[in-house]
Amino acid sequence: MKTINKLNISGAMVYPLIEGGKGINGTDGKSSGAWAKEGGVGTISMVSPTEVDFSGTIIPEVFHEKIRERRHREMVEYAIRGGISQAQIAHEIAGNNGRIHINMLWEMADSEEVITRVLDGAKGLIHGVTCGAGLPYNLGAIASSHNVYYYPIISSARAMAILWKRSFKNYAHYLGGVVYEDPWLAGGHNGLSNAENPLQPERPYERLISLRKTLVELGLPDLPIIIAGGVWSLSDWQDYIDNPELGNVAFQFGTRPMITKESPISDAWKMLMLRAQKGDVILQKFSPTGFFSSAIKNKFLSNLIRRKKAEITYSDSATDELSWLLPISPTKAVYINPQDKAKVEEQRNLGYSMIKETPDSTLVFLTPDEWLEMQKQRAECVGCLSQCQFSSWSRANGTTGKIPDPRTYCIHNTLMNIGHGGDIENNLAFAGHNVYRFGSDPMYANKHIPSVHELFAALLEGK
């Protein structure tokens, strides 16, 4: 196996092995500090990071305000305090080894404020900022003003060219690298565009070659490309290492570090991943962000799939095709295709008696309990996203102008739940498509949970 050589990342020579940032409670100061201690790049998730006080006690995220805008401010302030406390933990564990990065979902509402204030409050403790889920045009300006390197997450050469021309060319010095995240294999939110078929994955090699050619054209021939999404073992990527066509590359591991002793996710979530079979991870578009995402198929995801399959078209007025009158509430009736009458009765007989409209002039079916829970979650919305299909929240305008979409879910609620010991069947469980490999990897035999030290050593050996 080819030896992986150290690379200059965020101003230091480190192993080009990077802990993926993931989302709520996917990584924290302990996991990222342990990763950096091994000489790699640890990454703290800045998506509602858990606040820890001076004694090491976790301070839960609790909202007291009754007005959503004020709850939103509570969420932002909690994220800032949590991010600073987790950076301090990571720094202490790393002991000046490796690098510490933070990762932010760019579409999180007020993501720029969170990044800025965490960098202010954790000055000198953070070496790089990674951002995905959107085009982070202002990332270069924020990072450069703090003398910190930045790493956009993209899924195509075109996205990188747009970012460079519109913004990054003005902040080239602190552009530390670009993360290419495979949109078909990565866990969590993916950058699959409308022009790409979710059922027809493309080989990453050709897309990476295209990205390197674009970087050369932009005058960035040596900029590291961080390969992410579907990365399990370096032995799978031998043709990519020391490849003159690809140039400097690093590797980001998202799913595999989730099962370590230092990983903050619950033991139940770890066991779910250890049991996963090939095909258990589904690429779907139920996220209220509007992005594709990958998660393990459980009761939560299965119910969203059922809801989507039962969806029917309606109209407020009769048409040739939509001519059968269907009452959907005590005060409203709509017109549907007569052929859908059987589906309506089937759903009602199964207990899905609440019929709700979507922004796309379709109807979906919920149980009364599901509808009550949906109303409760919308009433408790904290405005976590810049705009949200589930609640119709918009950070810019207060509302998206569309009705709330009952085909999706409150992402803050479900990720907070599963990330802090909640039900693994009735919450969203993000994972990459290679999660099934835990079952055949000798490192995890007999449900063994390795330490970051064990995992990192194995990765260097190509295991």
Image (cartoon, rainbow, N blue to C red):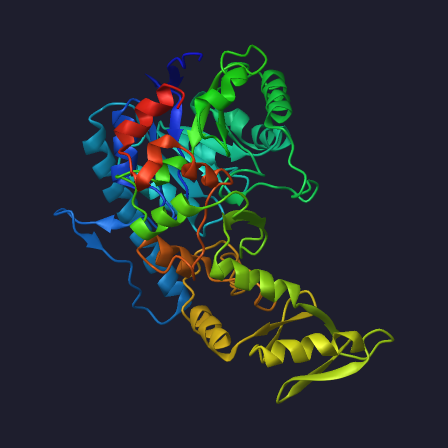
Q: Is residue 125 visible?
A: no
Residue 26 screen position, x and y as percent: 36, 44
Q: Quadrant of residue 382?
A: bottom left
Residue 259 screen position, x and y as percent: 34, 40
The foreground one among 252 and 201 is 201
Residue 354 is left or right of residue 26, and the answer is right
Residue 396 screen position, x and y as percent: 52, 56
- Residue 139's place in the image compared with 245, above or below, is below
Looking at the image, the residue that sits furthest to the bottom is 330
- Residue 211's place in the image compared with 61, above or below, is above
Residue 457 screen position, x and y as percent: 31, 23
Looking at the image, the residue that sits furthest to the right is 320
- Residue 355's place in the image compared with 136, above or below, is below
Quadrant in which the N terminus is drawn: top left
The foreground one among 217 and 165 is 217
Residue at point 46%, 62% (across, down): 410
Q: Is residue 14 visible?
A: yes
Looking at the image, the residue that sits furthest to the left is 55
Residue at point 29%, 68% (across, down): 64
- Residue 1's place in the image compared with 109, above or below, is above
Quadrant in which the C terminus is drawn: top left
Residue at point 28%, 34% (across, down): 450
Q: Quadrant of residue 206?
A: top right
Residue 457 is left or right of residue 154, and the answer is left
The image shows a total of numbered marks equal to 0
